[in-house]
Image (spheres, rainbow, N blue to C red):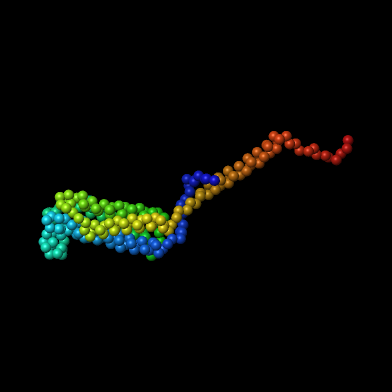
Amino acid sequence: EHTTAHPNEMERVATKRVNIVQLLINGLIGLVGGLFGSIYVQAGCHFVTVDVGLPLHFGLWQYSPMDSAFQGFTYCYRYDSDYTNDSPTFARIAGLIALVAGTFSLSVLWVYLLLGRTSNGLWKWAVRFLVVAASFQALTFSFFADDVCRRNSCSIGPGSIVSLVSTLSWALVAYEMKDNSPVVTALIPDPHQIGDSMMINQQQQGGNRSSGNSGLELTGYRPPPVSLGVNV
């Protein structure tokens, strides 16, 4: 029998059995592949290799100038006036959003793993932020559509590979956190709903008894005459 939920029903967070080892493994994957990978992509200067007659390295925030190329790419410069228009603005912003969102979600996961504390709403938001992290980490590949790669031939660098690993790590942790959530939502009915249900049941039972008596009358049933034991 289907019942309609009362609008005054309240939510309660109830714990359930979870695979802690699985969450721990995915927490490490998110920490190493997701967080450290995203930091590497932001800090590195070799997201793509640009062929300008000489292969140069370009990252989200800095690049290796030609002098560095002759010295074995030993140092990088921040984008200056020579390459201001070549700085991948959208890709770097996307990478920052992915880093912030992923850090928040990993904080929720590791607080639960270390302290055993979380909440239903917080866990759901952590999963959503991981989806955001995976999506925006993937958007760092918009670098290949920027000016420097439109004018020159670009190939993937270590930063691109790490960014792909970070994207997959964020997505994997999001799936595992959603599938292996330590909290569930239980519905506690409003006490007024319980009282209303009891009154409805009593009325239905009373109606059934009335229907039974009516049935007896319709069949022509009459009670036998009662003898008083007096002879006239």
Picture mark count: 0
In the displayed structure, 214 sits above or below 194; it is: above
Would you say 195 lies left or right of 175 here?
right
| In-image side of 17 versus 198 (left or right) | left
Which is nearer the eye, 78 or 51?
51
| Location of residue 27 (image quadrant) | bottom left
Is residue 126 shown left or right of residue 9?
Answer: left
Coordinates of residue 113 in the picture (x, y in percent): 39, 63
Residue farthest right in this picture: 232
Q: Is residue 42 visible?
A: no
Residue 127 rendering spot, x and y as whole percentages? 36, 55
Residue depicted at 31% across the width and 54% down the height: 134
Residue at horizontal 12 percent and vertical 64 percent from the top: 71
- Residue 204 can be seen, yes or no: yes
Report the residue at 46% width, 59% height from top.
16
Closer to the camera in the image, 162 or 120:
162
Within the image, what quadrant is residue 64 found in? bottom left
In what quadrant of the picture does the C terminus appear? top right
Which residue appears at 18% of the width and 51% of the height? 149
In which quarter of the view is residue 217 placed? top right
Q: Position of residue 56 (x, y in %)?
A: 15, 58
Q: Position of residue 52 (x, y in %)?
A: 13, 55
